[in-house]
Amino acid sequence: MMKDMMPHFDLVQPTDVESALDLLREHGRDAWALAGGYDSFDWFKNRGKQPTVVVDLEGLDGLKGVREAGDGIEIGAMTSLTDVESDLLVRERYGLLAEAVSVVASPQIRNAGTLGGNICQDTRCWYYRYGMPCYRAGGNICYAGTPEGMNREHALFGADRCVAVTPSDSAPALVALDAEMVARNTRGERVIPAGEFFMGPGVDITRMTVLDPDDLLTAVRIPARWAGAHFYFEKVADRKTWDFPLVNVAAAFRVADGRVEDSRIVVGAVECVPRRLTDVEDLIRGRVPNESTAAEAGELAAQGAKPLNYNHFKIPLVKNLVARAVRSA
Amino acid sequence: MAERSPPIVQNSDSGAPPAGDTPWEGLLANLPGRGNVSRRQFIKGVIATGASVSAFAYFAGPAATSARASVPRLVSVNVNGQTRRVDVLPQETLAMTLRYKLGLTGTKLGCDRAECGACTVMIDGVAHYSCSTLTQRVRDREVVTVEGLESADGTLHPVQQAFIDELGPQCGFCTPGQVMAAAALLEANPNPTREEARRAMSGNLCRCGAYDHYLNGVMRAAGNGSAVAEEVSSG
Ligand code: FES
Ligand code: FES
């Protein structure tokens, strides 16, 4: 099959959010909201998705940039990852996010890729990406979960028929920062806590977020709560560039008198949603973040993991990354 | 459906990367009187033919854009300082337009999936993968390809010269992309550390593994660049 050329679609380039929302509403499931395009074009070229109308969000200047809002900041969903990484407000107060977006994909991809796109991108499970009729694609089998399935990159937790994981580096950081997602459609605006924005297969197996087809993620708000806290981010991937995480960890700590007052610890790429480890947060509250606390935290982080045939190695990864995060506090 | 499939684009799709060169060899072998037609001229000839065929489709075909503010087909793109009028499909990538409509074959297609960097160009001075950029998105922006770097008198861009001096290219397929990534880096940061340069060049694969040579080239070009800048400012 010829795969270099994308199949035809109508391209519409609105210059204001209202028109974009109207178009998404009008065309429903036939429409596709195009941000940076790196995830989208893969789908189109491989014939995995064939929208008839593509709504190009590039012209929506109102969705770009970082500004102060309330006691924190608001980042437009169309802000490029490069711009998020280099923004002074982000670097100064929310270094966790700056660090997370700095290790996404490659420099060229960060120049075009957007924060909204990085949050909303679809899973990387290659059976699904290759167009296999799996649960997520509307079929009735999970190829990755079968005994012979190649599932080295797949889930340790929360699998429900589908074993795909979230591929995002920014998402765990945003959950750790107690961020809020601002979503709009023609009927109005919703503000959704980052921790409730992502969706596991048990709730809806065909999508990764709570966004409906006519919804648009317009901005991300980060409150003051964790501004300037102690942060830890680490991503483990097969390659330093381009690759999606095998496991990543994003953590924020408030430490006083040598003890952890409060924390957020979130692990990515081990479940369909960024996995917030509230039990680990509870465990370390009030404790000195020393070697033994870190080791306990690591053990607890991996508790309940259900490895597949080829992803056992993610268990020590989770343990070690969480332990390192706690030790750094 | 003429407007959906300009013949040249189909022809060019012999599938295998690198889409740049080898697929034409078979054609050339059978070409009568190949004699003094170089392979490059031949390819350019095919491109010109394709352009006229697709232009025909433009005039004879049905109205391509729906009334609802879809994008125009005949667009102006600023490439290497020149405004070029070109017939562009909604789903067409910049790499396709550059190579197969505008004859700028210096930009290579390796993976066509944003995974190799061979297609890197500058858009408003910033490095982008042209295989994963819609041409319709760059209508009002400035595109610079590897063909646009040398100055009018033929002096190479400092990066190009430094890559020659440091023996950067081996097979050369990734070179145009490496050149553009390096040129974009130096535009934003004329004096990068080696680590910064390494990071900026990390979106460009080299199958020959000439990474260190390229990196040496970037550092050499940065040295030249700042020397030149000093001369200019002190003069
Ligand atoms: S051709 Fe490989 S990144 Fe564009
Ligand atoms: S020089 Fe051969 S691929 Fe880089």
Image (cartoon, rainbow, N blue to C red):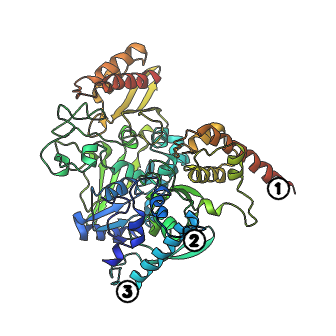
Task: Judge whether residue A42 can be spotted in this image.
Answer: yes
The residue carrying pointer 3 sits among few (fewer than 14), some (14 to 19) or many (20 or more) residues within 10 Å by Cα, namely: few
In terms of image quadrants, where is residue B89? Answer: bottom left
Disc 3: which residue = B60
Disc 2: which residue = B78
Question: Of the residues shown, which amino acid type is indicated by label 2?
Answer: Asn
Chain assignment, label 3: B
The image position of residue B160, as x and y in percent, is: 68, 52
The image position of residue A25, as x and y in percent, is: 25, 68
Question: Of the residues shown, which amino acid type is indicated by label 3?
Answer: Ala
* Position of residue B234 in the picture relative to residue B172 (left or right): right
Q: Which residue is depicted at the point 87% across and 57% down?
A: B235
Kindly state the secondary structure of the residue where label 1 is placed: helix
Badges 2 and 1, same chain = yes
Instruction: State which tag comes first along the sequence, 2 or 3.
Output: 3
The image position of residue A42, as x and y in percent, is: 35, 54
* Position of residue A308 in the picture relative to residue A124 (left or right): left
